Image (tube, rainbow, N blue to C red):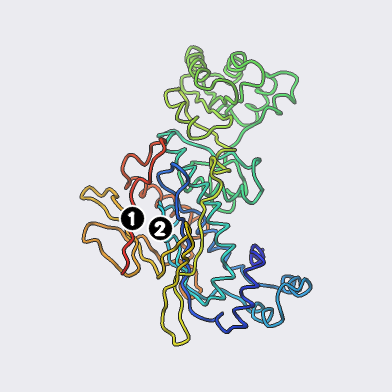
Amino acid sequence: MRTSFFTDHYELTMLQAALASGAAHRRSFFEAFSRRLPDGRRYGVVAGTGRLLEGLADFHFGDDELRYLKDHKVVNDETLKYLENFKFTGSITGYAEGELYFPNSPLLMVESTFAEACVIETYLLSILNHDSAIASAASRMIASAANRPCIEMGSRRTHEESAVAAARAAVIAGFTATSNLEAGARYGLQTLGTSAHSFTLLHDTERAAFQAQVDSLGRGTTLLVDTYDVEAGVRTAVDVAGPELGGVRLDSGDLVQQAGWVRKLLDDLGNWNTKITVTSDLDEYAIAALASAPVDAYGVGTALVTGSGHPTASMVYKLVSRQNDAGDWVSVAKAAANKASVGGRKFAVRQLNERGRAVAEVVSTAPYSTGEPERDLMVPLVIDGQVDASYTGAEGVAKAVARHHASIQEMPGEARKLQRGEPVIPTIMVRG
């Protein structure tokens, strides 16, 4: 599927005007960053990079797109001629997917002609803003869940393609599985699922429904026990499947109280190994409230795929340096109140203490070393139009999972707290 039309009208009208002025082919650096984290959040998580790199391969304008632009008089013939052969040939460096970020972290640096960087802007931001918002929320949920697994179950609460992206982002941040089959097929994610209330309601009795599920899926399946009366449902589930029953799912009511007495009931019936999974509009705070309850796994839907109240990462994409007519590089920056940016190409390292814990994000406009233990945050993603394929597909997801785990372990313990606060480490800007 071509990705070039996932863009805004004004990207192409800017291109047209820049072609007319002769500035379209000036070499430029664009920077993607977020001025601030969502209110009260301690860190953000970079996600979507792999999807962006995959989409660049299909970012071109075919006959249908060019005909639409011509018929609707979006751009002139000169611009259509340029777009006929469009292909991104620039270079991109940035934070590896799964990495944590902070205010003014230079998440991506795009070096290309102004024309190429301009045309991909909307596509780049739409992916990073959505996926990073989901991954940031998912990471908080994982912190609240401690060592209990979380399963992504939000497909029915969002757009079908957003559901795939959300599942991918959630797994990068630590979720163990998704209910979404397309996400599983595209990215090698584990998929899980058994039955809904409609399956129980379809049968004449709850026992008949449970028996049908066990006969088909085996005794290790998870039975949904709250369609009618929870206690009766648990007793029937155990009676049908015996001590080998894999699990029961609770989807309503006071989950903390309910999980407690269901665990005791299962144990009294001899089902010590039957696990309890809870669902029902969970977010990071509800998961934290269940910390003391005998719950084995969480299924999370709506709150996850909507960023748990923050559906965008509020990232922006700004021109920070460009060549002039003489070929000299000139730093440029927006100066508007509350929206000022810092000109110049950026470099970033994470300063560490003697125990390997992060103490600061150091962003500079020239290569810079703190003189202390540090880790370089910028990696090459695209070189002269050639994408590093290790950041795409299933391999890219696995790589991002590992990066996120390592980055979280590097943070001070306060990063895992849900209490509102400032970013867990400061961002230090060094102008070289």
Q: Mark 1: which secondary structure?
A: strand
Q: Would residue 9 be found to the left or right of residue 376 on screen?
A: right
Q: Give the amino acid type for the residue marked by disc 2 in the picture.
A: Ser
Q: Which residue is mark 1?
A: 361
Check if mark 2's residue and mark 1's residue have beta carbons within 8 Å.
yes
Left of 110 or right of it: where is 403? left
- Mark 2 or mark 1, which has the lower sequence index? 2
Of all residues shown, which one is farthest toward the right?
Answer: 71
Left or right side of 48 for 60: right
Residue 359: give x, y in percent of width and height. 28, 50
Under mark 1, the amino acid is Glu
Q: Is residue 217 above or below residue 106?
A: above
Q: Quadrant of residue 203?
A: top right
- In the image, what residue occupies the spot 48% across and 46% down? 38
Crowding near the residue tagged with mark 2, few <14, some 14–19, many ≥20 C-alpha atoms within 10 Å: many
Q: Secondary structure at mark 2?
A: loop
Pick the front one: 177 or 26: 26
What mark, if any, has residue 345 been given in the picture?
none
Q: Residue furthest top?
A: 268
Where residue 407 sits: x, y (%)?
36, 50
User: For the view shown, which residue lies furthest in the front direction?
Assistant: 337
| Residue bearing mark 2 | 105
Q: Residue 56 in the image: state x and y as whole percent.
A: 57, 67
Picture residue at 56% right of the left edge, 79% below the top = 24
